[in-house]
Image (cartoon, helix red, strand yellow):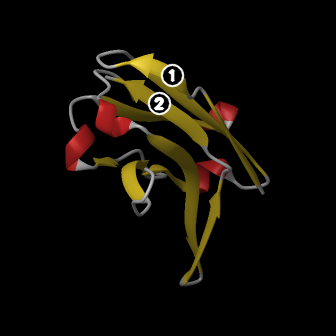
């Protein structure tokens, strides 16, 4: 299984970035796909998730600014980040989650760094 993130970088506050995560080695359409982030000195937290059926959830801190989407034909999940704030600075990780016969399985990417300058 491989999850490869891209799209991170340095951006000014108020700017936008689009993260991508390409998955291989899994049946992508059967996975709930998520974006998590970890800021220095903090725990990893859920940013957004899009389930296999298409429903989405967002952390309160990003609602109205970030949009998660998926393209099952391309095995890719996206995170469009608008109106970025300094506090969005973190390493962003792609996550794939699935439940098979009542057992949970998940995979993580290596992360892509997002730095927002104030």
Q: Can residue 33 be seen in this view?
A: yes
User: Where residue 5 appears, x then y in whole percent?
Assistant: 65, 38
Q: Which residue is outermost to the bottom?
A: 102
Say whether residue 47 is left or right of residue 83: right
Mark with earlier residue (1, 2): 1
Is 55 displayed left or right of 52 in the figure? left
The residue at the point 53 percent across, 84 percent down is 102
**Circle 1 sits in a helix, a strand or a loop, which is it?**
strand
Disc 1: CA contacts within 10 A as few (<14), some (14-19) or many (>=20): few
Relative placement, left or right, of 4 versus 41 is right
Which residue is located at x 21 percent, y 31 percent? 64
Q: Residue 102 or 45: which is nearer the viewer?
A: 45
Quadrant showing the N terminus: bottom right
In this orientation, does residue 78 appear? Answer: no
Residue drawn at x 68%, y 50% as measured from the top left: 110
Relative placement, left or right, of 56 versus 69 is left
Q: In this view, does 66 lie above or below 36?
A: above
Residue where numbered disc 1 is placed: 10
* Image quadrant assignment for residue 116: top left
Quadrant in which residue 80 is drawn: top left
**Residue marked by disc 2:** 115
Q: How far apart, in angstroms, are the residues tagged by discs 1 and 2?
A: 5 Å
Q: Identify the element where label 2 is drawn.
A: strand
Q: In which quarter of the image is the C terminus?
A: top left
Contact (Cβ within 8 Å) of mark 1 with mark 2: yes
Residue at the image position 51 percent from the left and 44 percent from the top: 92
Tell me if residue 109 comes above or below residue 17 in the rendering.
Answer: below
- Is disc 2 surrounded by few (<14), some (14 to 19) or many (20+) residues within 10 Å? many
Of the pair 52 and 13, the residue shown nearer to us: 13
- The residue nearer to you, when weighing 104 against 117, is 117
């Amino acid at each position: 299984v491989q999850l490869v993130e891209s799209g991170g970088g340095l951006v000014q506050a108020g700017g936008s970035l689009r993260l991508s995560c390409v998955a291989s080695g899994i049946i992508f359409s059967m996975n709930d796909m998520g974006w998590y982030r970890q800021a220095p000195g903090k725990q990893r937290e859920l940013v957004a998730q899009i389930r296999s059926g298409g429903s989405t959830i967002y952390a309160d801190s990003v609602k109205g600014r970030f949009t998660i989407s998926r393209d099952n034909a391309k095995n890719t999940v996206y995170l469009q980040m608008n109106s970025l704030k300094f506090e969005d600075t973190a390493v962003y990780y792609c996550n794939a989650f699935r439940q098979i016969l009542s057992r949970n399985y998940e995979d993580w990417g290596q992360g892509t760094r997002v730095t927002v300058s104030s």
